[in-house]
Image (spheres, rainbow, N blue to C red):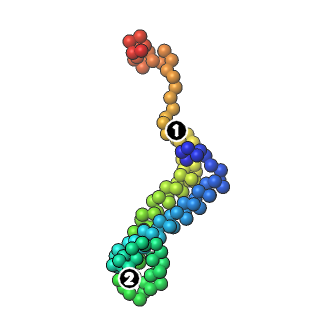
Amino acid sequence: MGRIGPLPLWGRLALLAGALVLAGAVWTLAASLVLLLGTGLFRFYPHPSTQWFLYFPYRNENARLGWWITTSAGIATLAVLPALARVVWDLFLRRLLQPAAQRKPLYGETEWASPSTAKRAGFDLKRHL
């Protein structure tokens, strides 16, 4: 998990809860924005926030509104789902599905070369240093 290091289960669950709240907020904003742009109602709501939930109960009364409710929900889901899937992968699934032997550090593993190793690799220490 980068700089914060490995977290205990409660820490990963707390991060997942925060990610779900953030994903819900981003989904709501994206769905509302697409809905208002698609239906032409953006001029009445220049700052979209929760309009998707405002118009959702009326989706069956107007075919155009119903289509835009469905379309905006799909577009918002396509925008949010990959990021949420990545969070779940990083916090939980990577440790389960990837054996420890296959996990490599970000910058690799290096050791100092001994003079004999350098000679076998073709380096002339007198000339290259």
Q: Residue furthest bottom?
A: 61
Is residue 10 shown above or below 119?
Answer: below
Residue at image coords 53%, 52%: 90
Left or right, 125 with respect to 10, comes to left
Counting residues from the start of the chain, the first of labels 2 and 1 encountered is 2
Depth order, front residue of 96/88: 88
The quarter of the picture where residue 123 lies is top left
Residue at image coords 46%, 72%: 49
> Which dot, 2 or 1, sits closer to the camera?
2
Residue 4 placement (x, y as % from top left): 58, 46
Left or right, 100 with respect to 33, comes to right
The amino acid marked with disc number 1 is Pro
Q: Secondary structure at mark 1?
A: loop
Is residue 108 shown above or below 6?
Answer: above
Specify few, some or many for label 1: CA neighbours under 10 Å numbering under 14, 14-19, or 20 or more.
Answer: few
Numbered circle sitting on residue 105: 1
Residue 121 placement (x, y as % from top left): 42, 20
Depth order, front residue of 24/123: 24
Q: Is residue 72 at least partly visible in the picture? A: no
Task: Find the distance from the CA under tag 2 to the CA under tag 1.
Answer: 50 Å
Is residue 24 shown above or below 54?
Answer: above
The amino acid marked with disc number 2 is Leu
Numbered circle sitting on residue 69: none
Q: Is residue 37 at least partly visible in the picture? A: yes
Specify few, some or many for label 2: CA neighbours under 10 Å numbering under 14, 14-19, or 20 or more.
Answer: some
Residue beneath label 2, please?
A: 65
Q: Secondary structure at mark 2?
A: helix
Residue at image coords 59%, 44%: 5
